[in-house]
Amino acid sequence: MRRMISRLGFYVVALWASVTLNFIIPRLMPGSPIEAYLVKMQGQNVSLHTIDALRAQFGLSNAPIFVQYLQYLGNLLHGDLGISISNYPYSVWEVLSSHIPWTIGLVGISVVLSFAIGTLIGIVIAWRRGGALDSTVPPILTFISSIPYFWMALALLYFCGFLHSWFPISGGYDINNVDPGFSFDFLMSALHYGTLPAVTIILGSLSGWVLVMRNTMVTTLSEDYVLMAQAKGLSYRRVIMTYAARNAILPSITSFSISLAQVVGGSLLTEMVFNYPGIGYVFYNAVNNLDYSLVEGCFLIIALAVLAANLIADVVYNLLDPRVRQGEA
Amino acid sequence: MTFLKQESYTRNHRRSGKHIGLLTLSALLALMVLLSACGGTTNTDTGTNSAKKSILTVNQAPKGDNPNNFNPLVNNQTSAYGTQGFLYETLLYTNRYTGKPQGWLADSWTQSDDLKTLTFHIRPNVKWSDGKDFTANDVAFTFNELKTYPDVDLSSLWLNYIQDVTATNDSTVTFHFKTTSTTTLWYIGSQTFIVPQHIWSTISGDPAKYTNTNPVVTGPFVLSKFSAAQITYDKNPKAWTASQDKVDEIRVPAIADNATATLELAKGDLDWLGVAWDPKFDTSYTKKDPAHNHYWFTPSNTVMLYLNTAKAPFNDVNVRKAISDAIDRQELQAKATPYAPPANPTGLVLPAGKAQLTPAYANATFTKDTATAQSLLAQAGYTKGSDGFVHDKSGKKLSMTLIDVTGWNDWVSDTQLIVADLKAIGIDASQSSLSQTAYQTDLQTGNYDAGVSWTDSGPTPYYAYSDLLDSSKTAPIGKVAPTNWERWSDPTTDTLLKQYNSSKDPAVQQRALDGLEKIMVEQLPSIPLSYNPYWYEYTSNHFTGWPAQDNSFAFGYSGNYPDDEYVVLHLTPVK
């Protein structure tokens, strides 16, 4: 219990530090949101008063930086993330909440699937190490994942979407025939549109899970307690899953929790290639437009997710590894 | 020992392993089949229930989500595409291609000889989409909103020009001006979009923050459905243009990336697009279906090599001339910007500005001339040193940094080529690629030596010259200059600009332009490189009547407002 409390204290300090960095980093970038807006307005006649008018419209503050920092902290405590300039006059919260579900749906499910499939394959080929699968699957997967992601995604898009029309080439759902909402048609449409991007994400990340799992599994399989379990006459499934895989999976759990946390950062390349309405492109746009509030909002969500994932990994470790529990006692 | 036993154990029970492997594979296969099967049910073509409807699909330029904002008083980068033009309209339409104004919501206008009074006569029988009459009061109300809330007066009309505006009766509205300016007709008549008084007078507070998600309009289209992924506009049967409008529905899908947009265009999912083109797209577009897939790139503004004339050595006209002579503009087009032909030395945009070109410069062109460039540098007092670079009298090397934007590949390549050209005449030139905001800040505050950038455009060459050369649009180094980034400050230039702006007489205006063209050619306040094209790609799969080389009634660029409306009203659906 004391360990958990000290962990929680650590999380609070980490949160404050990340919130403060969120505030500082965007403001260290050269230029201001107005210059970014003027670049988009290129060719239109701009005067000094245009610049003043835009400043007034966006409500940009001229207060000293420290006062702005205190205002920012105060607003955060009230759950107010501010107004997004690049989506003016919408609030950061509205922007985030309309994109995060797409990202969690696509990237989240892909990461979980990739982890599950990769780990299973890893277990299987480690169990049958030296076999035909073991000598073909890892090199093939390594080959696929060493293809640059955007190239693979574009090639699949071109082949499956443009040339053969098996899958739609862009978007998150069929914008002409269904409305977003919890309807069967919409979910099916979202599934159809999400398949190709999901396949590219899974293909790109599968080999990592397979290799890590296979390698730790091979080491674990040579442990005495696995031999002991077999000697006791336990079923193969029980030996593989409860004795070998349960111990071998610990390193994968750590990287899985990190990958899950990264989900909310979005997958920029996937979103750009497939024109998918996720958070990655919003984040990219926010940085390009020096949209301070939106950058801060995105960073905040990522920081919270990383901290939450760490917390979950801590708990899962507790459950999976008795040694951690004993250390606590 | 352990290892060996383990090994034999596995070998003996190979079947079990195979079982798990097969299970995983079949589960994967089942998932794929299920996903594609599910998809099949919703993959209905857009055309099924719309066989009779003519649908135009347009994406102006990929930039992600559609904003849920239909406020025509804020800049068009904030409001949704279509707000200015399809929904809201202006009093006049000035064709940027021909420079000619014509009546729009006002069917005629009169300007006093001293340019201090401007009267619009409102077109009769124009109705708002809710059935109310459009009157001169709506016009006066719109302009008075700009007065009350300066943050929506983006062209600074009240600060610079307007004394007062009154609706003398339901069909006449009169403006009085503080200063004489020919530009008022453009900014007031053709660039301010009129909103309905009976709706907008009821909103509280700053109209800039009003998102107007239920727009009441005069334009040929009304908002039918909004989603961040796609906006749908339906034909407005009450519009005064309804009899001309043959487009039943406009769809504006949100697209994030140029590559996706060009694929959709090639696939026939998009009809109208405005993205920077790359010749390598041709294989899957124009070459795939030359009968339907087209583009037409026309010069929109002159791309300049800006030199910071507020500091040495760029305040020396010989140095500027030497730099200009060193550049091989044919090579820039051949290697970096295939759709941007070399600019005319006057900086006028041709062919649109042909009528205003001084006869003496009708055939003027830039040619690369290294020998002249080197002798100009010698005249400016530079001598070649043993390091291969030229040095001034104090022995200082002539060096300069050219700025551009990371990712703006055409201009990055332009800059690379220019740097090589400058090195060839002994200038120690280098390149620095910045983020777009840093680049914009450096140009504005004068924190640069040289940089490739755009100039502004308008219906006549005056707008580009004024933004480029007017000393009131520059500032000392360190202060923000809105457009005159090269910091040209010259009384003769200012007088000529004023002469143009304060006269109604085309002959007087042309004399002023002649003078400005002469200054551009002889003094090179900034160095014309090439013409930025208006990016315009369209397919004739669903509509014909598009602006084109042989049908050049307007620029086809979808990012000019309200010109997009004018183009749409010329389209005819393919039967």
Image (cartoon, helix red, strand yellow):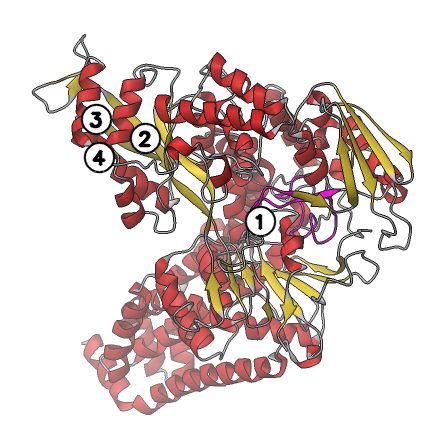
Q: Which tag, 2 or 4, sits closer to the chain's start?
A: 2
Label 1 and label 4: CA atoms lie apart by 34 Å
Name the chain letter of the residue that bears numbered label 4: B
Return the residue at label 4. B421
- Give the mark, 3 or 4, whose residue is nearer the N terminus: 3
Position of A149 with respect to B196 (left or right) is: left
Q: Quadrant of residue A246?
A: bottom left
Element carrying mark 2 = strand
Residue position for label 2: B402
Q: Amino acid at mark 1?
A: Gly
What crowding class fits label 1: few (fewer than 14 Cα within 10 Å), some (14-19), or many (20 or more)?
many
Percent across and percent down for residue B196 are: 84, 44
- Dot 4: few (<14), some (14–19), or many (≥20) neighbours within 10 Å? many
Mark 2 is on which residue type?
Leu
Closer to the chain start, of discs 1 and 2, is 2
Q: Secondary structure at mark 4?
A: helix
Query: Among all residues in the image, which is located at the extreme top?
Result: B394
Residue at left offset 29%, top offset 16%: B313
Circle on res. B559: 1
CA gap between label 1 and label 2 equals 29 Å
Dot 3 or dot 2, earlier in sequence: 3
Q: Nearer the viewer, mark 1 or mark 2?
A: 1
From the image, tell me which residue sits under label 3: B373
Q: Is residue B555 left or right of residue B185?
A: left
Say which of B214 and B287 sits in front.
Answer: B287
